[in-house]
Image: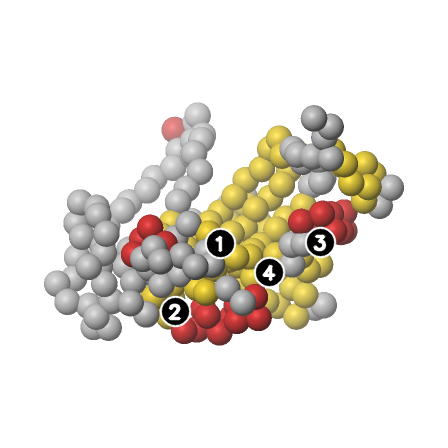
Amino acid sequence: MTASQHTIAGTVLTMPVKVRKATQHMAMFSVDADAAQGMIDYSGLRAARYLPGRAAVALILAHFIDGDLGEYHEFSTSVMVSPPRSKVSGPRSLQSVFIHHMLVDQTFTLESGRTIWGFPKVMSDFTVHDADRFAFDVSIDGQLVVDMEFRPGDVQWLRNAFILHKRTAYHDHPEPERKRHLLRLWLAAAVLDDATPRFPVGGGAPS
């Protein structure tokens, strides 16, 4: 079998494109299904309603460090969708994703993504800090569209009924004075004021 190739800006790319090193931050939110549907109506797809009135939206910040498309940052917003004619419901319906937009800061990946895969990539400006604090912001034509910041000692409140999240492996510093110190507090509310379905203690599907 002959590998497919594409020429982008005078560079020949052989499929599959390889990513050798990258980092990623990702969070998935439970959102109003009608609002999510309104955001992607133009696609002709249906937002997956994994619970009555609820859909799932993922925000992903990636830093591609070493790969065939070069180094760049990418921020994407994706909506979990139901495949055409699918009758699957509940959490099992979260199997397909539609990328609403991809913000990138490098022209080669912009052209490659649009030309080869049809990704909705938009040229943007990224500012990322990852030293004593983690923070980033993204602007398009000078207008701020995304920003987030975490400093040492900050408290992040995560409500498991709304947010599905994951982490990549953490590599600690060898020096004792620089080692990570993480405190985690679990709060259980008997009744949620907005009647949002909750994930049960010990795991399982929300009810």
Mark 4 belongs to which amino acid?
His
Mark 3 belongs to which amino acid?
Arg
Which label number is shown at residue 97?
A: 1
Mark 1 belongs to which amino acid?
Val
Q: Quadrant of residue 122?
A: bottom right
Q: Residue at x 69, y 34 (%)?
A: 15
Q: CA distance from mark 2 to mark 4?
A: 18 Å
| Residue 158 appears in the figure | no
Q: Residue at x 33, y 50 (%)?
A: 92
Q: Which residue is mark 3?
A: 114
Q: Residues within 10 Å of mark 1 (few under 14, many from 20)?
A: some
| Residue 48 appears in the figure | yes
Disc nearer the start of the sequence (1/2): 2
Q: CA distance from mark 4 to mark 1?
A: 12 Å
Disc nearer the start of the sequence (3/4): 4
Q: Nearer the viewer, mark 4 or mark 1?
A: 1
Mark 2 belongs to which amino acid?
Ala
